[in-house]
Image: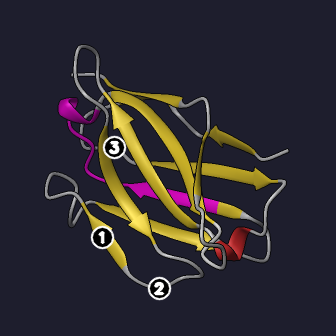
Amino acid sequence: QVQLVESGGGLVQPAGSLRLSCSASGLRFANYDMSWYRQAPGEERELVATNVSPAGDIKYADSVRGRFTISRDNAWNKLYLQMNSLKPEDTAVYYCKAWGPNNRAVRLAYWGKGTLVTDSS
């Protein structure tokens, strides 16, 4: 079965850096669009960044553009989010999402359980 497991979250000081990882299994990773979402307390879940399969178009939310970098390693079925210059408003649970496969008429979404990132201000 498809499984997405996030890691790398934790407590970081303002303006610090952190790298999140998402390990995927049970799917042909290269055939899935991969995204990072986040949800802050009391807020709606929002899209942070998307990396279209296999490593094509990349999009960022305006709030993180220039600070965050999304990347993927199809050989190791991993998705990354490098977060620099962290701000208090970046505090949230970050989720890994897979959407696909892109070679099928019906696409499904799979979610990880999330990893908490806390910016200490």
Cα distance between the residues tagged 2 and 1: 10 Å
Q: Position of residue 120 (x, y in %)?
A: 29, 22
Q: Nearer the viewer, residue 69 or 61?
A: 61
Please name the residue shown 31% across and 33% down the image: 45
- Residue flagged by tag 3: what amino acid is it? Gly
Bin the neighbour count of mark 1 within 10 Å (Cα to Cα): few under 14, some 14-19, many 20 and up. Answer: some
Q: Secondary structure at mark 2?
A: loop
- Residue flagged by tag 1: what amino acid is it? Lys
Q: Secondary structure at mark 1?
A: strand
Q: Earlier in the sequence, mark 3 or mark 2?
A: 3
Q: Earlier in the sequence, mark 1 or mark 3?
A: 3
For the record, the magenta segment spans 79-90
- In the rendered image, residue 80 lying in the magenta stretch gets the answer yes
| Residue 10, placed above or below residue 76 | above
Q: Is residue 55 left or right of residue 87?
A: right
Colour option used: secondary structure
Q: Secondary structure at mark 3?
A: loop
Disc 3: which residue: 16
Disc 1: which residue: 59
Disc 2: which residue: 56
Mark 3–mark 2 contact, CB under 8 Å?
A: no
Which quarter shows the C terminus? top left
Q: Nearer the viewer, residue 81 or 102?
A: 102
Please name the residue shown 31% across and 49% down the image: 47
| Residue 78, placed above or below residue 2 | below
- Residue flagged by tag 2: what amino acid is it? Gly
Please name the residue shown 75% across and 65% down the image: 77
Bin the neighbour count of mark 3 within 10 Å (Cα to Cα): few under 14, some 14-19, many 20 and up. Answer: some
Cα distance between the residues tagged 1 and 3: 22 Å
Residue lying farthest left?
62
Which quarter shows the N terminus? top right
Among the 4 quarters of the image, the one containing residue 118: top left
